[in-house]
Image (tube, grey):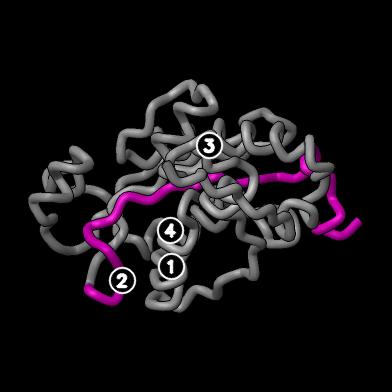
Amino acid sequence: MSLQSRPLAKTTFVVLDLETSGAAPSVGAGITEIGALKVRGGEIIGEFQSFVNPGHALPEFITSLTGITDSMLFDAPAIEQILPTFFEFLGSHEESVLVAHNAPFDIGFLKAAASQNQFSWPNYTIVDTVRIARSALGRDEVADCRLATLAEFFGATIEPSHRALDDARATVDVLHGIFERLGTFGVSTLGDLTTFKRKRERKPLD
C-alpha cells in the first residue's frame, strides 16, 4: 500500500514544533528547542524534546516570547549533534508524515540545518495544519487559524505557550479535531488529506 492510499488511522504522523532565535535561517537565526510527538490511530507512541544551542545570544524579545534564556541553552547540544537522533526519531519518509502548524517555518529551519551540516533531507510528506484548517473550517467558525485559536476551538488539552513540546501537543489535538471534521467530507486517506480543498464562505458585510 502506498503512503498516499494509507488510511489516516493507520498513518504515522510526527507532529513537531520548533522554537527559534529569529524569523528565518537566512538572517542567521537558529533552532533553540525541538518538540515532537509521534502519533498513530489517535494515540501518542513517541516523544522527543531537546533544547538546542544556536551558537549566539538570544534577542530579548525571543526570551520574552518563549521564556527560553541563554542560560537554559548554555549546556544544550548544537543542532549538528541533535540531527542524527532526531532523524532517527522521525523515521523514514516512506513511513512517517511530518505535521506542523505553519509548516513552511519549521520545515524551513530543519531543511536549512540539515543542509548546513551535510545531512540529506528525506522527501517527507508534509501536512500543514494551517492550510487544512483553512479548508476544513468556515469563516463563521474561527476568526483566524492561529494555533491558539484552533486549540481553543477544538478543546485542546493544553494551551499553546511558545514552547516546543506544549505547542506540538496542542497541534496534535488540533490535527485530530480536523480529522474528525474532514471525516464528514469523506476524507479517510492521506491522499484525501493532502489534496482536500474547500472554499471558505466569506462573512457577509454588515
Tag 1 secondary structure: helix
Q: How far is disc 2 from disc 3 in space, using C-alphas?
A: 36 Å
Instruction: Find disc 4 in the rendering and name its residue.
Output: 106
**Mark 2, mark 3: which one is toward the viewer?**
3
Tag 3 secondary structure: loop
Residue at left offset 73%, top offset 60%: 195
Q: Residue 8's image quarter? A: top right
Instruction: Find disc 2 in the rendering and name its residue.
Output: 25
Residue 140 has which mark? 3
**Mark 1 near mark 4, Cβ–Cβ under 8 Å?**
yes
**Mark 3, mark 1: which one is toward the viewer?**
3
| Nearer-N-terminus badge (2/4) | 2
> Where is residue 61 shown, x and y percent of the image?
12, 50
**Mark 3 near mark 4, Cβ–Cβ under 8 Å?**
no
List the single residue furthest toward the front: 206
Instruction: Let me know if residue 200 appears in the view.
Output: yes
Tag 2 secondary structure: helix
> In the picture, which quadrant includes the N terminus?
bottom right
Q: Which amino acid, mark 2?
A: Pro
Residue at left offset 69%, top offset 53%: 198
Instruction: Find disc 1 in the rendering and name its residue.
Output: 108
Magenta segment boundaries in residue numbering: 1-27
| Nearer-N-terminus badge (2/3) | 2
| Nearer-N-terminus badge (3/4) | 4
List the single residue furthest toward the left: 60
Q: Which amino acid, mark 4?
A: Asp
For label 2, count other residues whose C-alpha is less than 10 Å away and answer few (under 14), some (14-19) or many (20+): some
